[in-house]
Image (cartoon, rainbow, N blue to C red):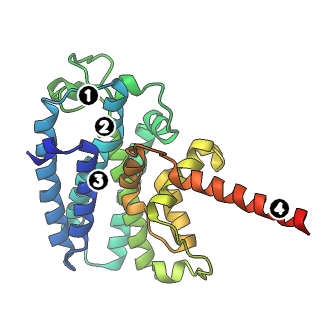
Amino acid sequence: MYFMEVNYISYFNEFEREYEVIKNASDDVLTIYLDILHFIEKKLKEIYKWLKKYVFLSIQEEIYFFKELKPRMVSKLLFYKELLKLEASLPPSKKNKKKHYEQLLTTIHQYVKANREFYEYYRSRTSFRDEDLFVRRCYKDIIKYDCCLINFDSKLSTSHDFNVATIIANDMLTNHLENKLDELNGKSKSNSTQIDHKFNWTGTKVDMTELVYAFQATGCINNGNFDLKELAIFLGTMLNVEIDSNLYGNYSDIKSRKVSKTRFINTMSDKLIEKMDNEDSKKKNQ
């Protein structure tokens, strides 16, 4: 099986690339939604078959898989299922459409409130509970966790990887609903963000991804307490580059580098030092 022949991180990166192709393959949104759902279903079946045999080399590797990789894929499944439901139930009038979108946003907000503790843990990117939440268990602690876990397959899931997928899907759905409301209110992206693009990003999207993650790791923006994709969208808007659609895939590529994981940041440091040295040298020669 293809999945077994390659590094699984490469498999997820390839999934993101194929997903982008399918997402832009048609002008018919329902066709796109269905194609994406069938595509993800096929990929998840491959992953589940692989998971039943694969032994992770470390707890950290297992946590990364169930906290970062698997939820990213499952979140897209949840998101597009919700979009299909949305299209099927959408009322015809503008007024009722707005009411429908707002009700869905309220539902998401209620879910956030009901799961605030986990939201705060995940959003803060802390890790002190990761081993408890994102490592598979052979037993079911029904007192500690939800009763629905009694029937889930412990080889395929942890207690909270689906919760992460739900958070990501809710973020995507919130963004979608807010854009729809903006359209109904006459605020399209083109006229709601009038930005004079004097500055354009001329590095690679992977280079920008390094910066986004570095801003969070160093805590130099909001003390590191922000959603990575939101910052990616903000920087992309300012610098006329779109990196948020494959942010996590780019980050996986960066983490899998054998030499110099922070290649761009290291180059920035070297170039700045070189610039300062050249300026000092010119002053001495004057």
Callout 3: 10 Å neighbours few (<14), some, many (20+)?
Answer: some
Precedes in sequence: disc 2 or disc 3: 3
- How many angstroms separate mark 4 from mark 2 (CA)? 49 Å
- How many angstroms separate mark 1 from mark 3 (CA)? 19 Å
Q: Which residue is mark 1?
A: 56
- How many angstroms separate mark 2 from mark 3 (CA)? 13 Å
Q: Which residue is mark 2?
A: 65
Precedes in sequence: disc 4 or disc 2: 2
Quadrant in the picture for residue 205: bottom left
**Amino acid tagged 4:** Ser
177, 48: nearer the viewer:
48
**Amino acid tagged 2:** Phe
**Foreground label between 4 and 2:** 4
Q: Which residue is mark 4?
A: 281
Residue at horizontal 11%, vertical 48%?
Answer: 2
Residue at horizontal 11%, vertical 44%?
Answer: 45
Q: Position of residue 143 (x, y in %)?
A: 30, 16
